[in-house]
Image (cartoon, rainbow, N blue to C red):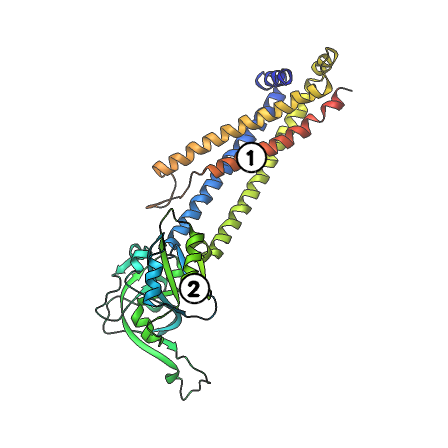
Amino acid sequence: MKFPLYIAKRYLFTKSKSNAINIITIIAAIGVFAGAFSLFIVLSGFSGLRDFSLSFSNEFDPDLKALPDTGKIIQLSEEQEDRLLKIEGIEELTQVIEERVILSYKQKSNPAYIKGVDANYQQVTKIDSAIVFGTWLTKSEPQVVVGNGLSRLLDIGTFNYQNLLKIMVPKPGKGQVTMTNIQNAFSTRQTIVSGVYSVNEELDSKYVFTNINFARDLLSMQPDEVTGVEFKISSEADLDRISEEIIAVLGDNVQIKTREELNDALNKMLNSENLFVYLIFTLVLTIALFNVVGSIIVMILDKRENMKTLHSLGATTRQIRNIFFYQGMLMTVLGGLLGLGFAIVLIILQMQFDLVMITPSLPYPVQMRAKNVIIVVATIFTLGFIASYIAAGTTRKALK
């Protein structure tokens, strides 16, 4: 191995008599450098965008959420609530009631979901930080907090006592609704808008928050009935164990979802985008590595007489083939690692000094992750191995 590697290093770092070969080698090295550089930049950028996108839903979604497996209702007694709070790893829980409603304000109407929450809701989620106008709910009067999207759609302001927001929901029961009894088919309440929140476009146009007792009265639900229980879990806790203990308390008719499962569609979309971008830039890197193949083949043709001399001195065909294989691997690895190093420096500078801005106040999000480094190194090594092996395979013909 030492003999082929020594010759490979000499061929790689020593200028050839032909300027064309030197230029081809430089172009091949630059191609590998650029491919590794761009691949890591894109992966780091998508990691940052992923965290940035999920950070908004993290303000809204709990660590764990118990939902009814069938139907819409979970029976939750005070004794069950006490048992849940005693489970190791559960820091806090909150009861919630969710249902689809119709919002009506002045002459405008829009469907939405009402979400009744208790006083512990702010301890489980970070919804406080999402309030952009007004205040969070108080117990002084019936109030709601609407999303920024709903606020624009209905042209709703905060604390407008002259124009109250009307919330309508179909009454439970059976039978057909006709024009004569359509008003009686809906439970209707009027309330004041105390605040406006902003999380993301989807949630801002979907949810209206209110006190749980107001939602329970609107939906004609019993005091021990909820549609979900949300939990704040300590960072070191075992989610699988806690989920099993929650089911043991609430019964088998509930299902437990993690924050990732609550955002399953968003996670799948982000993972798919990340995969497609990786495949596209891997294709670019593969095309760049064809330059390595061409560079090695040209080098083989240039060194044909040297190869015959080495063969006459006792070097085997395999050793001569390994010379050019190692040369291709050295070119690929050195160019790739150099590109990766420059990309890491650029990502660190972006994280520290906000070199690229999306808006005057929002820097482009990037994340430095060891996984991305491993992906880039593994991709370069694999593609470089294949390219070098293909190129080195032409030495047998050159010796004839």
Judged from this view, the residue extending furthest toward the top is 313
Give the quadrant of residue 80: bottom left
Query: Is residue 211 or residue 227 the one in the foreground?
Result: 227
What x and y, as percent, mark residue 232?
35, 55
- Residue 270 against residue 111 in the figure, above or below: above
Q: Which mark is nearer the camera, 2 or 1?
A: 2
- For residue 194, side relative to residue 319 (left or right): left
Q: Disc 2 marks which residue?
A: 67
SS state under label 1: helix
Circle 2 Cα neighbour tier, 10 Å, few/some/many (<14 / 14–19 / ≥20): many
How many numbered circles are shown?
A: 2
State which tag comes first along the sequence, 2 or 1.
2
Q: Please say if 342 is above or below 179.
A: above
The 10 Å Cα crowd at callout 1, few under 14, some 14 to 19, many 20 or more, is few
The residue at 39%/49% (across/down) is 237
Label 2, label 1: how far apart the Cα atoms are: 42 Å
The three-letter code of the residue at mark 1 reads Ala
Name the residue that disc number 1 marks.
Answer: 378
Residue at 29%, 60% in the rendered image? 120
Q: Residue 90, can we see it?
A: yes
Label drawn at residue 277: none
Rendering coords of residue 378 (x, y %): 55, 35
Q: With 240 as the anchor, is 126 left or right in this view?
A: left
Most distant residue in the right direction = 400
The C terminus lies in which quarter of the figure? top right
At a point 30% along the width and 62% down the height, the residue shown is 196
Between 276 and 223, the one nearer to me in the picture = 223
Disc 2 and disc 1 in contact, CB within 8 angstroms: no
Vertical arrangement, residue 336 with respect to residue 305, above or below: below
Please indicate, yes or no, whether residue 258 appears anywhere in the rendered image.
Answer: no
